[in-house]
C-alpha cells in the first residue's frame, strides 16, 4: 500500500515537471520574437506624434488664413461693385472655414450678394444659416427680412424687421422697412376681404340653376379674371372652388367649359402645391377627356391647362447645379410620369378626337425631351420610348382612308414626325439609338411581313413619317428587303390611296443624295407618267413635288442641273397654278408649296414667284390657315427667295486650283446677285410677307419646329437689311414676333433673330418699336450677341442697339447690369476694330449714368479711368467723343475721381488741352465740362490747370459769341468763375480774387 502511494506521488510529480517544461519551452519560443523596447524608442514615438500634431495645426492655420484672405477679397470686390466675384470668394471661403462664427459671417456676406443678384431664395437660406449660429446677428436678420419681403412672405418678413427695430429702435432703415411691410400687409388683408366677397358672389350665381344663362356666363368670365390675381386664386381654392370647376367642366355650354379651364389655369400658374392638389382632385382621366373633345377651342384650352400644370410641377424639381461634373438632376416625380402615361395612352385611343390627339403629341414634344443638352439626364425620353414608342408608331402608320384607326387631322402625321425626331435627338449613346432603331425596325418588319395589303401600307406610311422625322432611322427601314420594290409597285396601283401613300414615301426617300440619284435614274419616268396621266389631282401634285425635289438636287449651284433647261420653270409654273386654285383641298395646295420650296433654289424660279402676286397671296393665306404642316415649306421658300441661307465663299486660290485640276466648282446664278435680291425683298414686303411671318410665329404646333423658327428668323433678318424697310417691319408686328424667335429656336436661329432685333433698335426708337414691358425683353437677346462666336458685325450692331437702350432710362440700365452686359461691353472697349471699340465706349457712356457702374471706377486696382483718359486723346473722333463724354459724366457725379486723373498718364493735361482746342463743338464742350468738374473738385487741380495754357484757352472760349457754341461758352465762363472763387486769378477791375500765381 505504501509502495503504491509512493509510485503514485512519483508519477504526479513527473507529470507536473513535464507541464512546467512545456510552458517554459513555449514561453521561451515566443519571447525570442519580442524585442526589448528601449526608452529612446518611446521618445521617438513622442516626437513623431508631436510632428503630426504640429503639421495638422499648420494646415488648419493655413486654411484659416486662406479663408480670411478670401473673405477680405470678397469684401473688396463687393465694395467695388463686382458682386459675382465677391460671391465666388465667399463660397470658396466657406469651404475652408472651420469655426461656426466665421462661417456665420461668410453666410451673412454671401446673403448680401444674393440680394444684389435678385436670388432671394438663396439669400433667405444663407441668412437663416447665419442666424442659426448667432440669433442676435442683426445684419443677417435684416437681410433675411429683405429676402422674405421680395419673396412675398410678408408675415415672416414683418417678424424679422420687427425684431431688428426692437434691437436698434433709432435705425431709420429698420423703421422704414417695418412701416412698408405693415402697409403692404394691411393692403393685402383688405384685398383678400374684397376678393372673398366677389368669389362668394360668383359661386352663388354659378350654383344657381335658376339664374339666367347670360348671368352665369358673365360670372364664369369674372371668375377667370379673379383667378389671375394671387389673392383671388387663393380664395377660389380655399372655398372649394375646384369642386365647382369640376361641375362646370361637365357643362354642355362651350363658354362655361372654357371659363372653367381658364380659371384652373389661373389657380395652377406658378403654384406647385395647388397644382398637385388639383391634379389629384380632378384627375388626369377627366382632364385628358376634356382635351380629347372634338371642339377645337376646348381641346386647346385643356392642352394649355396641362402645359401650365407641367410647368408648375417641374418648377421645384431642378436642384442647384454645383459644378460641371455634378450636373445631375432628380428624376421626375411619380405624378409627372403618371400624367405623361395618360398622354401616351391617349394617342391610339379611338375615343379621342383628332385635335385632342394633336394636343397630346404637342405636350409630349414640349415636356419629354431635355431643354438643354447640358443636362445629362435623358431618362424621361428613354422611359417614353420604352412605354410609348409603339403607340406613337401606331398613330404614325395610320392611313385614315382605308383603316379603322383613331381619328386624325392633316397635322397628325407631321406632329408624329416631330415627336419621333425630338425623342431620337435626345438620345446620348449609340446603344440608346440602336435600341430606338431596333424597336422601329421590328414594328415595321412585323407589319410589312403581315398578311394583307393594309398591313404593308401601314409599314410604308410609318417609314414615310420616320423619313420626315429621324431620317437616319427612316433610311435604315427603307433599306429593308423588298421595301423600295413595294413602294415602286404601289405607285402604279389603281387605288388612289395606295398611290398616294407610295408617292409620298418616294418623295421623302429622295432626300438622300445617293437615293435621289437612284430614283432620278429609275423613278423619274414613273413620276412623269403619274403627273401626266393620272386623273386625280392629289396624285398629280404629289408626283410633281417628287419631280421638283429631284430637279433641285443641285441646290443653289447654277452648274448642277438635273433636268433640261426650262424644265424647272415649267414645274414651278404648275406649282403656282395649283397653289392659286381655291377649289383644290388645302392638302394639295400645301404640296404645291412643298414643290416651290425645292424649286426656288433656282434664281429664275425665285424671280417668277415674286412677280406672281396671286401666288404670293395664296401662299401667305396658307401660312395663316389651320394647316400647320405647311409652315416649314413656306419658311424654306422664303429663305430661298431672300437668299438668307448661309453661303460660304470659297477661297479664290482654291477655286483656281480646282479649275486647274478639272474639279467641279460651284457657280452662283447671276440673278442671285445683291441688286436682284434687294428687289425681291421689296416685292415680298409689298405683298405682305411680314404679317404672314407674324402669324406663323404665333402658331402653337409641333410643326413649328426649331428649324422652322430658324427659317423665319433668317427671313426677318433679310427684311431688315435696309434701314428704310425697318419701319414697315415694326409697324406690321415684326418686332414683337422676333422676341420669341430669339429665345426658342436653334442656336443659329436665336442669333439671327437677335441680330434683326439689334438692327431695329439701332434705327427705330426702342420705346416705340417695343412698347411697354417688351423693351426689357430685348436686352437679353442683344447681350447674347456680345460673344466670341458671333461675328464682329453682330457685336457692333448689338453694341449700337444697347447704347440706345441704355440711354432711355435707369431701369433699362439696371436690366443691362442684371444681364451682365457691363463686363462684356468693357471687353469690347479693347477691341482692335475701330468701329467696335468706339461703339463699346459709346455704350459705356450711357451706362455710366447708373450709380452701380460709376462705383466700378472707384476700384484703384483697375485701369478703367486710365483707358478713358487715353481714349480721349485718340485720333478717332467718334471714340474721343464717347470717352470724353464718359469722363465728363464721371467727374461730375464722382468728384473723388478727379484727384486720380493726373496719375493716370503724364499726358493728361495735353489731352485736356487738345479737347478744348478741338474744332468739334462736341469735343470742345466735353473738354470744358471736364475742366469745370476738376476745378470744382479740388483747389490744387484748379491751380495746376490755371498754371498751364488752359487759362488762356478758357479765356478765348468764354468770349465766344456764336449761338451754336453757347454751351461751350457757358462752361468756359464757369471755369473762370471757379478760378476767381479759388483766388487763382482776378477780374479786370481788380475787385475780386488775388494775383495769379504761376
Image (spheres, grey):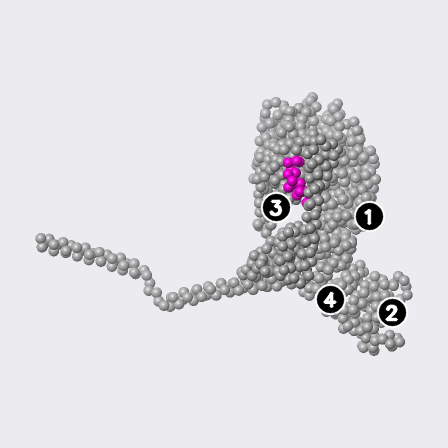
Q: How far apart are marks 3 and 4 (CA)?
A: 46 Å
Q: Position of residue 844 (x, y in %)?
A: 75, 58
Please, what secondary structure does the residue beneath circle 4 have? helix
Q: Closer to us: mark 2 or mark 4?
A: 4
Image quarter hosting the C terminus: bottom right
Residue at which label 2 appears = 956
State yes or no: residue 235 in magenta: yes
Residue 897 is marked as 4
Nearer-N-terminus badge (4/1)? 1
Provide the residue designation for mark 1: 723
Single out the mark in the foreground, 3 or 4.
Answer: 3
Give the left or right position of residue 719, taking residue 347 as reference. right
CB under 8 Å between discs 4 and 1? no
**Front tag of 2 and 1:** 2
Which numbered marker is on residue 316?
Answer: 3
Looking at the image, which residue is at 69% across and 39% down? 200
Q: In this view, does 3 lie above or below 543?
A: below
Task: Give the CA separation, mark 3 to mark 2.
Answer: 69 Å
- Which residue is at 85% across, 68% downward? 973
Query: Can you give x and y, in whole percent of width and height, for residue 966 in the image?
Result: 87, 63
Who is closer to the viewer here, 492 or 432? 432
Amino acid at each position: 500500500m505504501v509502495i503504491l502511494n509512493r509510485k503514485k506521488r512519483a508519477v504526479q510529480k513527473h507529470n507536473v515537471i513535464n507541464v512546467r517544461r512545456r510552458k517554459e519551452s513555449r514561453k521561451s519560443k515566443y519571447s525570442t520574437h519580442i524585442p526589448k523596447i528601449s526608452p529612446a524608442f518611446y521618445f521617438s514615438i513622442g516626437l513623431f506624434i508631436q510632428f503630426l500634431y504640429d503639421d495638422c495645426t499648420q494646415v488648419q492655420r493655413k486654411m484659416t488664413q486662406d479663408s480670411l484672405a478670401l473673405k477680405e477679397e470678397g469684401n473688396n470686390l463687393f465694395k467695388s461693385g463686382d458682386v459675382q466675384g465677391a460671391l465666388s470668394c465667399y463660397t470658396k471661403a466657406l469651404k475652408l472655414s472651420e469655426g461656426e462664427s466665421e462661417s456665420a459671417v461668410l453666410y451673412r456676406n454671401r446673403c448680401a450678394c444674393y440680394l444684389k443678384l435678385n436670388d432671394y431664395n438663396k439669400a433667405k437660406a444663407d441668412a437663416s444659416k447665419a442666424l442659426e449660429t448667432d440669433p442676435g446677428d442683426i445684419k443677417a436678420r435684416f437681410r433675411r427680412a429683405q429676402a422674405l419681403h421680395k419673396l412675398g412672405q410678408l408675415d415672416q418678413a414683418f417678424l424679422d424687421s420687427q425684431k431688428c427695430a426692437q434691437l436698434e429702435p433709432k435705425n431709420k432703415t429698420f423703421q422704414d422697412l417695418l412701416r412698408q411691410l405693415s402697409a403692404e400687409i394691411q393692403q393685402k388683408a383688405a384685398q383678400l376681404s374684397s376678393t372673398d366677397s366677389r368669389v362668394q358672389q360668383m359661386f352663388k350665381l354659378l350654383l344657381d340653376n335658376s339664374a339666367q344663362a347670360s348671368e352665369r356666363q358673365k360670372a364664369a368670365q369674372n371668375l377667370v379674371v379673379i383667378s389671375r390675381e394671387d389673392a383671388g386664386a387663393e380664395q377660389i381654392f380655399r372655398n372649394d372652388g375646384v369642386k365647382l370647376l369640376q361641375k362646370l367642366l361637365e357643362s354642355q355650354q362651350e363658354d362655361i367649359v372654357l371659363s372653367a379651364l381658364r380659371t384652373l389655369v389661373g389657380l395652377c400658374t406658378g403654384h406647385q402645391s395647388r397644382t398637385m392638389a388639383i391634379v389629384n382632385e380632378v384627375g388626369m382621366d377627366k382632364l385628358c377627356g376634356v382635351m380629347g373633345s372634338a371642339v377645337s377651342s376646348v381641346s386647346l384650352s385643356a392642352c394649355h391647362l396641362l402645359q401650365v400644370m407641367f410647368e408648375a410641377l417641374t418648377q421645384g424639381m431642378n436642384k442647384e447645379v454645383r459644378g460641371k461634373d455634378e450636373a445631375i438632376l432628380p428624376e421626375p416625380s411619380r405624378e409627372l410620369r403618371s400624367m405623361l402615361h395618360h398622354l401616351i395612352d391617349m394617342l391610339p385611343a379611338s375615343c379621342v378626337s383628332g385635335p385632342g390627339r394633336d394636343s397630346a403629341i404637342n405636350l409630349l414634344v414640349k415636356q419629354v425631351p431635355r431643354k438643354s443638352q447640358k443636362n445629362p439626364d435623358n431618362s424621361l425620353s428613354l422611359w417614353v420610348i420604352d412605354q410609348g414608342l409603339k403607340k406613337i408608331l401606331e398613330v404614325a402608320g395610320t392611313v385614315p382612308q382605308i383603316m379603322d384607326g383613331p381619328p386624325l387631322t392633316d397635322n397628325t402625321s407631321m406632329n408624329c414626325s416631330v415627336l419621333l425626331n425630338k425623342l431620337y435627338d435626345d438620345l446620348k449613346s449609340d446603344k440608346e439609338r440602336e435600341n430606338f432603331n431596333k424597336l422601329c425596325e421590328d414594328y415595321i418588319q412585323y407589319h410589312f411581313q403581315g398578311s394583307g395589303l393594309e398591313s404593308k401600307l401601314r409599314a410604308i406610311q410609318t417609314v414615310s413619317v420616320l423619313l420626315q422625322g429621324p431620317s437616319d432611322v427612316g433610311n435604315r427601314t427603307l433599306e429593308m428587303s423588298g421595301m423600295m420594290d413595294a413602294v415602286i409597285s404601289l405607285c402604279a396601283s389603281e387605288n388612289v390611296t395606295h398611290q398616294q401613300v407610295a408617292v409620298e414615301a418616294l418623295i421623302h426617300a429622295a432626300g438622300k443624295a445617293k437615293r435621289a440619284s437612284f430614283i432620278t435614274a429609275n423613278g423619274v419616268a414613273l413620276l412623269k407618267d403619274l403627273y401626266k396621266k393620272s386623273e386625280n389631282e392629289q396624285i398629280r401634285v404629289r408626283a410633281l413635288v417628287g419631280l421638283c425635289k429631284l430637279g433641285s438636287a443641285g441646290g443653289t449651284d447654277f452648274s448642277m442641273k438635273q433636268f433640261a433647261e426650262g424644265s424647272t420653270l415649267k414645274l414651278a409654273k404648275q406649282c403656282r397654278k395649283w397653289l392659286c386654285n381655291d377649289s383644290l383641298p388645302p392638302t394639295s395646295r400645301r404640296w404645291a408649296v412643298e414643290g416651290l420650296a425645292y424649286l426656288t433654289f433656282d434664281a429664275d424660279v425665285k424671280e417668277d414667284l415674286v412677280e406672281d402676286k396671286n401666288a404670293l397671296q395664296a401662299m401667305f393665306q396658307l401660312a395663316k390657315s389651320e394647316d400647320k404642316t405647311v409652315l416649314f415649306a413656306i419658311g424654306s421658300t422664303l429663305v430661298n427667295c431672300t437668299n438668307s441661307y448661309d453661303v460660304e465663299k470659297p477661297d479664290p486660290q482654291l477655286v483656281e486650283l480646282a479649275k486647274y485640276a478639272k474639279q467641279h466648282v460651284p457657280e452662283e446664278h447671276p440673278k442671285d446677285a445683291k441688286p436682284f435680291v434687294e428687289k425681291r425683298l421689296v416685292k415680298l414686303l409689298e405683298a405682305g410677307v411680314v404679317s404672314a411671318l407674324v402669324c406663323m410665329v404665333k402658331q402653337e404646333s409641333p410643326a413649328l419646329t426649331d428649324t422652322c423658327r430658324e427659317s423665319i428668323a433668317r427671313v426677318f433678318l433679310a427684311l431688315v437689311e435696309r434701314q428704310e424697310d425697318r419701319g414697315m417691319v415694326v409697324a406690321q408686328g415684326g418686332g414683337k414676333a422676333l422676341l420669341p424667335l430669339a429665345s426658342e429656336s436653334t442656336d443659329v436661329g436665336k442669333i439671327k433673330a437677335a441680330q434683326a432685333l439689334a438692327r431695329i433698335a439701332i434705327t427705330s426708337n426702342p420705346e416705340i418699336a417695343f412698347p411697354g414691358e417688351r423693351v426689357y425683353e430685348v436686352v437679353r437677346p442683344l447681350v447674347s450677341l456680345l460673344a466670341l462666336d458671333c461675328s464682329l458685325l453682330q457685336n457692333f450692331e448689338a453694341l449700337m442697339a444697347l447704347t440706345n437702350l441704355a440711354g432711355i432710362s435707369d431701369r433699362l440700365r439696371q436690366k443691362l447690369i442684371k444681364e451682365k452686359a457691363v463686363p462684356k461691353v468693357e471687353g469690347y472697349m479693347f477691341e482692335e476694330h475701330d468701329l467696335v471699340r468706339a461703339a463699346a465706349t459709346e455704350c459705356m457712356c450711357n451706362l455710366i449714368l447708373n450709380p452701380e457702374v460709376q462705383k466700378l471706377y472707384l476700384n484703384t486696382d483697375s485701369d478703367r479711368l486710365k483707358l478713358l483718359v487715353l481714349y480721349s486723346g485718340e485720333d478717332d473722333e467718334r471714340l474721343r467723343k464717347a470717352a470724353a463724354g464718359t469722363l465728363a459724366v464721371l467727374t461730375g457725379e464722382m468728384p473723388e475721381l478727379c484727384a486720380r486723373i493726373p496719375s493716370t498718364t503724364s499726358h493728361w493735361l495735353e489731352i485736356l488741352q487738345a479737347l478744348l482746342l478741338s474744332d468739334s463743338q462736341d469735343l470742345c464742350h466735353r473738354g470744358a465740362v471736364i475742366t469745370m468738374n476738376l476745378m470744382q473738385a479740388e483747389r490744387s487741380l484748379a491751380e495746376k490747370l490755371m498754371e498751364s495754357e488752359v487759362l488762356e484757352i478758357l479765356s478765348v472760349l468764354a468770349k465766344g459769341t456764336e449761338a451754336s457754341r453757347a454751351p461751350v461758352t457757358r462752361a468756359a465762363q464757369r471755369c473762370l468763375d471757379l478760378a476767381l472763387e479759388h483766388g487763382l486769378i482776378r477780374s479786370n477791375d481788380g475787385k475780386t480774387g488775388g494775383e495769379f500765381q504761376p
